[in-house]
Image (cartoon, rainbow, N blue to C red):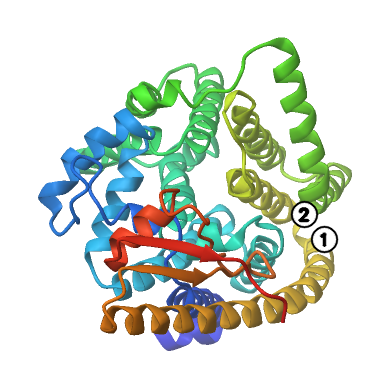
């Protein structure tokens, strides 16, 4: 029976999931520790090395006081840093495959070949357009916070999506209990993605309530649990100190900067989405799925808008916008009338494949260079230890692409991440040597 299913068209899906798993597995293994990875090896409570799970609650309690309220994500980071790197590498590859599967659920009713084509488009779009790909998919701390976070968000939103599409089924009490626990964690996981998820959940619940003239207590309970989680996240004492200036001129300036940033970095996925939306409206695609697509797209913008009030903004913070935009695009392509789906998807797949080929080769080679630099750095560290050196200057390395991690230490040994890296490697002080050309 399994053989017949594979022969009947499931094989492309299986191969795609396997390819995603293997690529992220290999690239995660080649990606070294940088920045926050060193810091989270130690307890926020007493700066002792984290060697057991029992140390993590006290560390995260102090983390809320000093850094931010993202204790669910960073507790997982500290747990993973106790274990050998192979544990993270395997789990990170599993999450990439899970993320692929969660995307697949939104158009699982399509023929397997068509679904596989849409998934391939999604995977290539994420590779091409995810800003700071290394810190979203390959860096330990970043992966747990971002790509693992989007998997959690999509799991949380699934009951709301199925209720909206009229596909919801009754669940056993234990499934509901797990869903509420998931809702609590999803709400407290990330300042911007959790807010976007709550927005989607509330809108879909309202639409279902208006349509069916009744309110699902399970969906409302999920929203309530997520709100509690979000309140816990945002009420961290450290969070208040990370807000930006609230004057009109400051907000207007940050909005201008964010618009400029989106134009520079997100124009391509936005243009692809606009073309897919125009096509879906022209060909009279399924209205429910068009609405769902627009909702995800708007939620992506909302997740970006959350940083108008933040103290700082970096490339990795717009990853949820890219995720939601890609999923929204795939929803539109999957919603097209059956006889008119193949050509637009094939054309987009071809365009994405060309971009992907260049980016994959360039990014892969950059990762190999970065891995070689990390090996050289580790060799210097081993030799210094053997020689009894207590203070060491390490060469910095700036990646050529967004797929490789940058290793940077400041000239000041007391600066971060110098202090954390010195503590991790067992030196009194570490400083950085600027790169020399060639």
Could you tell me which residue is drawn at 35 percent across and 46 percent down?
A: 73
Helix, strand or loop under label 2: loop
- Please name whichever residue, 258 or 151, is drawn nearer the observer in this view of the structure: 258
Q: Position of residue 66 (x, y in %)?
A: 34, 32
Quickly name the residue at label 1. 340
Query: What is the crowding at mark 1: few (fewer than 14 residues within 10 Å), some, or many (at least 20)?
Result: few
Do callouts 1 and 2 mark residues in contact (Cβ within 8 Å)? Answer: yes
Q: Position of residue 46 (x, y in %)?
A: 18, 43
Q: Is residue 434 above or below residue 181?
A: below
**Image quadrant where residue 84 sits:** bottom left
Mark 1–mark 2 Cα distance, whole angstroms, equals 5 Å
Q: Position of residue 207 (x, y in %)?
A: 57, 24
**Image quadrant where residue 413 sits:** bottom left
- Please name whichever residue, 438 or 341, is drawn nearer the observer in this view of the structure: 438
If the image is split into quadrants, where does the N terminus sit?
bottom left
Could you tell me which residue is drawn at 62 percent across and 57 percent down?
A: 132
> How many labels, in total?
2
Could you tell me which residue is drawn at 55 percent across and 18 percent down?
A: 210
Query: What residue occupies the far top of the structure in this picture?
Result: 247
Query: What is the crowding at mark 2: few (fewer than 14 residues within 10 Å), some, or many (at least 20)?
Result: some
- Please name whichever residue, 236 or 324, is drawn nearer the observer in this view of the structure: 236
Quickly name the residue at label 2. 337
Helix, strand or loop under label 1: helix
Q: Position of residue 58 (x, y in %)?
A: 17, 39
| Residue 224 shows up from this direction | no
Residue 161 is left or right of residue 342, and the answer is left
Could you tell me which residue is drawn at 77 percent across and 77 percent down?
A: 358
Q: Is residue 337 above or below residue 128?
A: above
């Amino acid at each position: 029976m399994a053989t017949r299913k594979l022969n009947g068209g499931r094989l492309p899906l299986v191969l795609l999931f396997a390819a995603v798993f293997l690529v992220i597995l290999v690239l995660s293994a080649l990606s070294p520790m940088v920045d926050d990875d060193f810091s989270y090896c130690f307890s926020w409570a007493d700066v002792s090395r984290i060697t057991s799970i029992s140390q993590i609650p006290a560390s995260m309690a102090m983390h809320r006081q000093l850094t931010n309220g993202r204790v669910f994500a960073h507790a997982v980071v500290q747990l993973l840093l106790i274990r050998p790197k192979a544990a993270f590498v395997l789990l990170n590859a599993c999450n990439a495959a899970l993320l692929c599967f969660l995307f697949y659920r939104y158009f699982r009713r399509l023929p397997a070949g068509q679904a596989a084509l849409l998934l391939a488009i999604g995977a290539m779009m994420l590779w091409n357009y995810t800003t700071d790909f290394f810190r979203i998919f390959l860096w330990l701390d970043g992966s747990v916070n971002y790509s693992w976070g989007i998997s959690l968000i999509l799991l949380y939103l699934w009951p709301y999506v199925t209720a909206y599409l009229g596909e919801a089924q009754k669940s056993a009490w234990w499934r509901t209990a797990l869903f509420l626990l998931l809702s609590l964690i999803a709400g407290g996981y990330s300042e911007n993605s959790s807010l976007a998820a709550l927005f989607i959940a509330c809108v879909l619940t309202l639409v279902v309530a208006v349509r069916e003239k009744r309110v699902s207590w399970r969906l409302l309970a999920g929203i309530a649990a997520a709100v509690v989680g979000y309140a816990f996240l945002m009420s961290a004492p450290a969070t208040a100190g990370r807000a930006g200036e609230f004057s009109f001129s400051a907000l207007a300036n940050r909005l201008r900067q964010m618009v400029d940033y989106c134009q520079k970095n997100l124009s391509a996925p936005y243009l692809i989405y606009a073309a897919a939306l125009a096509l879906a409206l022209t060909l009279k695609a399924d209205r429910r799925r068009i609405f769902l697509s627009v909702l995800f797209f708007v939620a992506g913008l909302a997740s970006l808008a959350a940083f108008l009030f933040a103290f700082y903004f970096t490339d990795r913070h717009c990853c949820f916008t890219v995720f939601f935009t890609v999923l929204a695009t795939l929803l539109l392509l999957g919603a097209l009338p059956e006889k008119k789906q193949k050509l637009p998807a094939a054309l987009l797949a071809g365009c994405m494949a060309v971009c992907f080929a260049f980016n994959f080769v360039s990014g892969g080679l950059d990762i190999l260079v970065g891995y070689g630099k990390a090996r050289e750095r580790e060799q210097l560290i081993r030799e210094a230890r053997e020689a009894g050196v207590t203070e060491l200057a390490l060469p910095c390395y700036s990646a050529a692409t967004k797929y490789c991690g940058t290793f940077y230490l400041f000239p000041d040994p007391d600066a971060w991440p110098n202090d954390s890296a010195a503590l991790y490697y067992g030196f009194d002080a570490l400083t950085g040597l600027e790169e020399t050309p060639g």
